[in-house]
Amino acid sequence: MSIIPEETRQGRLAGKIIIVTGAGSGIGKATTELFREQGATVIGADLKGADHVADAGNEDDIVRLVSIAREEHGGLHGFFANAGISGGLASIFEQSVEDWQEILRVNLIGPFLAIKHAAPVIKEVGGGSIICTASVAGLRSGAGGPAYSASKAGVISLVKTAAQQLSGSNVRVNAICPGLIETGMTEYVYERARAKGVEDRLGHLNPLKRGGHPSEIAHAAMFLASDESSYVNGHALVVDGGLSSSHPFNNQSYGRTAI
C-alpha cells in the first residue's frame, strides 16, 4: 500500500546505509523493502527471515551489525531499532520476573544498544538518524500488556534522553508509536476477529475506523530516516489513526455510569 506518489518517493534515501532490526516480518520487512526501493543499502537483521541473524537485545550482535556497516559498506547513516516482542496480555499479577526481563531486554535494552553503538559511527559520516519503535501502549494504558507497555514508555523516554546526550553530534534520535497494525505480533487479534466475523470492528476506536498497515509505519520511518526530517529530534511520532488523540470510549455507553 503506497500513500505517496511514485515520482515523489524515488531516491529519498539514496546513498544511505541503514541497519534495520526485526527485518524478517511485519513493520521491519515493509521498511526494509521501502528503504531499498528509495536507494538505501539496508542491513536487515532478525532471528529469522532477514539477511543477517541477530538478537536485537544482544550486545555482541549489535556490535557485529554496526561493524558490518562500517567495514563492508564504509559507514552508517541510520539505525531502525524496530525488533520487539509483545509478551501477551497477562496482568501484572500473572507475569513473572523472567517475563519482564525478557520483554525489557528486547524492547528497551535493544534500542539502548542500537543508540550506544550506532551513534558514534553515524557521527563519523557527519550525522544521521536513529529510529526506535515504541507504541501507543507507551503513552497510556489499554493498548498492551504491562511489561510491553512499560518497555515502550521506556523507549519514548530513551529517545528524548539520547537526543540530549547526543547534542552537537548531528545524530538525531526519534521514536515511532504505532497503533494497531496487522503484523505477526497482532496476528492472534486479527485471527480471532475473523473467526468471530467481526474483523470490521478492528481499529474501530480510532477516528479512521480501521487498523493500520506495516507500510504506513514504513513511510513514517522513511521520513525520519531521510534528510527531510533534519529538524526532528527527540520526538515520538504517533501513527495510530488518531487513537491517542482521545481516551477511547464506547459510543453506546459514553456518559453513563458504570454502576
Image (tube, rainbow, N blue to C red):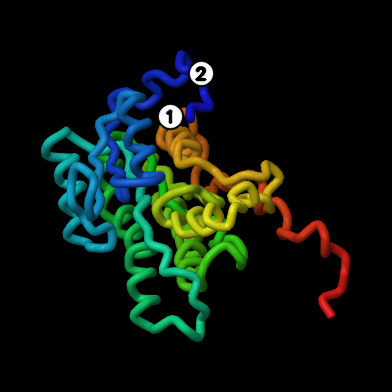
How dense is the environment of label 2, judged by Cα within 10 Å: few (below 14), some, or many (20 and up)? few
Circle 1/circle 2 CB separation < 8 Å = no
Q: Which mark, residue 5?
A: 2
Along the line of sight, the residue nearer the viewer: 111 or 53 = 53
Along the line of sight, the residue nearer the viewer: 252 or 97 = 252
How dense is the environment of label 1, judged by Cα within 10 Å: few (below 14), some, or many (20 and up)? some
Which residue is drawn at the image coordinates 35% and 60% (left, top)? 112
Q: Residue 86, how many percent across, how many down?
A: 42, 64
Along the line of sight, the residue nearer the viewer: 181 or 150 = 181
Would you identify the image quadrant in which residue 250 lies?
bottom right
On screen, 138 above or below 184? Answer: below
Q: Residue 111, how many percent across, how many down?
A: 36, 57
Which residue is drawn at the image coordinates 72% and 59% (left, top)? 247
> Which residue, as the protein is rendered here, is positioned at the far top?
7
Taking the image as shown, residue 77 lies to the left or right of residue 251, namely left
Q: Nearer the viewer, mark 1 or mark 2?
A: 2
Q: Residue 9, how many percent across, how many down?
A: 44, 21
Q: How far apart are marks 1 and 2 (CA)?
A: 18 Å
Which residue is drawn at the image coordinates 56% and 51% (left, top)? 179
The answer to whether one can see residue 87 in this image is yes
On screen, 88 above or below 27? Answer: below
In the picture, the quarter occupied by the C terminus is: bottom right
Q: Is mark 2 on a helix, strand or loop?
A: loop
> What residue type is disc 2 on?
Pro
Q: Mark 1 points at which residue?
A: 227
Taking the image as shown, residue 76 lies to the left or right of residue 240, namely left
Which residue is drawn at the image coordinates 45% and 66% (left, top)? 151
> Which residue, as the protein is rendered here, is positioned at the far left?
71
Taking the image as shown, residue 154 lies to the left or right of residue 129, namely right
> Which residue, as the protein is rendered here, is positioned at the far right?
256
> What residue type is disc 1 on?
Asp
Q: What element carries label 1?
A: helix
